[in-house]
Image (cartoon, rainbow, N blue to C red):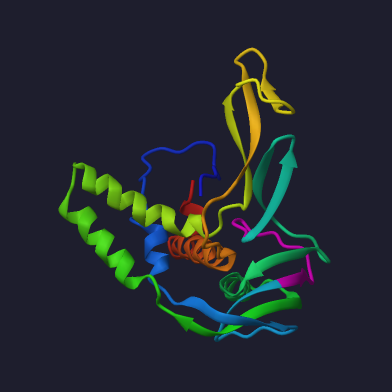
Amino acid sequence: RTQVYKGFGKNLFYYDVNSLYPSAMLKPMPQGPYKWTSSFHPSTIGFYEIVLKANTSLYETPFLFKVRSGKTQGNYWINGIKGETFRVSSEDIKLMKDLGVPFSIKQGIFWDRQEEIFTDYVNHFYQVKNENKGNFKYFLAKLMLNSLYGKFGQRFDFQELILDDGRENAQMYDVRRGLILVQKKSRFKYHAIHLAAWITSLSRNIHFRMMLENGLENIY
C-alpha cells in the first residue's frame, strides 16, 4: 500500500516486505471447477459478494472502491455504509470476522480443491535472485517472481499509446506530442483471473495483518 495515514512524523522507521507477492504464491491456490453458494465456506478458497449490516469506522479498511475518471481508474480504500455491497475474497472475510465487521453473504463461488502449484517456480527464482546480487540474473529473477501472477489477470483487450503513424480511425491522445491510442489484443493464452485475484488478496491481507500486529496507531 502507498497510503499516507498521518501527515507528519519524526524518527520513523521504514520497512519493506521482502518478496510479498512471491511469498503469497507459495500458499495453496484454487484448482478445478468452482461451485456457487449463498454461504461462507471457511475451509476453502472463494470469492463472495457481501452486504454490510452496519456502517464501518475502521482506521484501516479492507473495502476497495474503484472510481473511473476519464481514461484512468483510481482505487480507494473506504469505510462501508450499511446496505452497501462489496466483492471480497475468503481471506478478506476472515479478516472482517476478526475485525468484528457485521455482514451477510449475498452469493459467492468457492473451490473444493487447492494445491501449492507455484512452489518450485518461486523457490527456483528466489534462489537465482539470492545467488546473483548485482548482475542481470538478479534483476531477471526479480522480474519473474513479481510479474507472473499479474499476467494471469492481464486484460484480453487493452489500449497502447504510440506515435501517430497516420492510421485511420485512431483515437488522438496528445496532439502536441503526436500520440494516439490503439486497440490491442493480448497474445497471452493462459488467463486465470481467479489466480491473480487470489494472490493479490493474499498479499494484501499479509500486509494488513502485519500492520495490525504492530499497532495501527504506529502506521504513518
**Count of numbered circles in the view:** 0
- Viewer-proximal residue among 180 and 117: 180
Residue 202 left/right relative to 167? left
Q: Residue 120: image x %, image y %? A: 30, 71
Q: Residue at x 40, y 77 (%)?
A: 116
Against 120, residue 19 (above or below) is above
Residue 55 magenta = yes
> Looking at this rendering, what residue extends furthest in the left direction?
131
Residue 53, percent from left and from top: 79, 72
Main secondary structure along the magenta-highlighted residues: loop
Q: Quadrant of residue 9?
A: top left
Image quadrant of residue 96? bottom right
Residue drawn at (17%, 50%), measured in percent from left and top? 132
**Image: magenta residue range:** 49-61
Is residue 210 placed above or below 115 in the rendered structure? Answer: above
| Rendering coords of residue 108 (x, y %) | 71, 77
Residue at left offset 70%, top offset 53%: 65
Q: Is residue 58 above or below residue 34?
A: above
Farthest-out residue, right? 83
At 58% from the left and 68% from the top, the residue drawn is: 194
Q: Nearer the viewer, residue 5 or 180?
A: 180
Q: Is residue 109 left or right of residue 6?
A: right
Q: Quadrant of residue 165?
A: top right
Closer to the camera in the image, 167 or 144: 167
Q: Position of residue 160 (x, y in %)?
A: 59, 35
Q: Name the foreground residue: 52 vs 59.
A: 52
Q: Is residue 57 magenta?
A: yes
